[in-house]
Image (cartoon, rainbow, N blue to C red):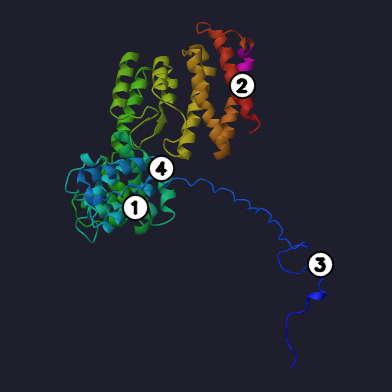
Amino acid sequence: MASHGLPSLATLRLGASTGMPGTNADGERPVKAPRVEPPAPPAAPPVAPPPPAEPPMLLLTHLPRDVISKIVTQAALDARKAEVPASAICAWMKRFCTSAHVQGVPCDDYWYKLALAAFGVDPDAVAEPPPKWMRNNTKRSLSWREFFGSVCDAFFARPTNLPFIKENFKSVFIYNSTQRELDTGLGALSSTCSTVIQTKRNLPSFTEAIAVLKADWDLAMRGKRSALFSWTYWPLMGLLLLRGAEPFTYDKYAALDHEVYVAIMATKGDALSAPERLSTDEAIRRIADAVARGANVSFTYKSVEPRWRPFLTLTAAVEANNPEIIKWLLDHGARAGLGLWGLEIDMRRQYEYVRQLITKTVYDVDEWQVDFKTTEELMGEAVSFFENAKDKDQNLFLMGMDILNTALEHMEENGFESHYGENYSDTDRAVMKGFIYSGWKSIFDEYYQDA
């Protein structure tokens, strides 16, 4: 049997590697290399301290009712600054009352009354309970919540509502309104409603439609069922009523405006226009009194019978050739611009103004009593006619340019231009002619290319 012993040592040579692990040729263990540590990872960025804990949400259940009322009132006042105040307050009240409901707090009906401040309503000036007219044809009395909702619907129930309101019922967006502005705003709504009545009932005249409106209005004010409640913009009428507007005041203000015309023409001694002759001081006193009672400083009415005839106060004052009254009117905001009766009527009134001013400053220049500065202001008002008519009524524009061209030819034939460019003096009427010529010529030159 073969033996299995250790291998013979004879075959080993001195100095040869033993082949033992961990030794060198001399049989020595090598010196261990120093351990190289891997590079430390980059330091982590400093951790920001946690933000302070948000304060717990203020629950309506923790607030007194008067504090909540102040919150709603402030939201309504802030909504006035929004591009569309109605959109701002309607959305805010919806969110607010939804949040209140979630917290178990019923949305008080009074809060909706406070929210109407966004539309210029003073809640403190509106008595409780709601007025009799605040109802509809199915419910005898609306809550403030229901009325507020109807106002929001008037603005947003149809996409066309808001643009129509902005274009036709601007008084709804004016917060510091005069009594006349409120009444005129309600009158604009009434006029539109009358047009709807005339169309729907196929009435032969607008006068008959107004009579129907007045009958419906009377029912509404007494809290009775009225067709008026079904009109889309009835809630806007309600808003103006809450702000103190009075209905059907057209004749009242037209008569008041007519007082201004009579006072102006009375200084001229025109028996056809005024029953008496007045001094300038007395006329200005009467004009100021009429304006304080609501007369419009820019337009008046030339006659009240057989029909109202609109007229610019500046046209009347120029016709009367009264420099003190002209200056008083200009100083108190009288203008010959647009925005008085509507585009077509406005431009015709402007045309009358231009004709009257040309007559007095060109053909009756020797009697013209107005100083240079005021004359320049009056000519500036004439520019608005040419500016508006050139785009909106070409025929009227050409008529204006024609009378101005004829006036320039008259001035050139009579030597007005010989004084052109001289130093102006209110006491030198010859120089006034040069001033007037230069003013009208500059207007003609500016608009001639459009003629």
Instruction: Tell me, for residue 152, which label it has, or none.
Output: 1
Residue tagged by mark 2? 441
Q: Give the range drawn in magenta.
A: 406-417
114 or 383, which lies in front? 114
Classify residue 312 as left or right of residue 440.
left
| Circle 4: residue type | Ala
How far across and down, in percent of the image, does residue 72 sit?
Answer: 28, 45
N-terminal-most mark, 1 or 3: 3
Please determine whether, in this image, residue 316 is positioned above or below residue 227.
above
Classify residue 106 as left or right of residue 403.
left
Q: Residue at x 70, y 56 (%)?
A: 31
How far across and down, in percent of the image, does residue 251 sit?
Answer: 30, 37
| Nearest to viewer (mark 1 / mark 3) | 3
Instruction: Tell me, for residue 82, which label it has, or none.
Output: 4
Does any portion of residue 347 appear in the rendered image?
Answer: yes
Instruction: Tell me, for residue 16, which label it has, or none.
Output: 3
Circle 1 residues within 10 Å: few <14, some 14–19, many ≥20? some
Q: For numbered disc 4, what is the local secondary structure?
A: loop
- How far, Cα to Cα, is label 2 from label 1? 53 Å
Residue 33 colored in magenta in the image: no
| Circle 1: residue type | Cys
N-terminal-most mark, 1 or 4: 4
| Circle 2: residue type | Lys
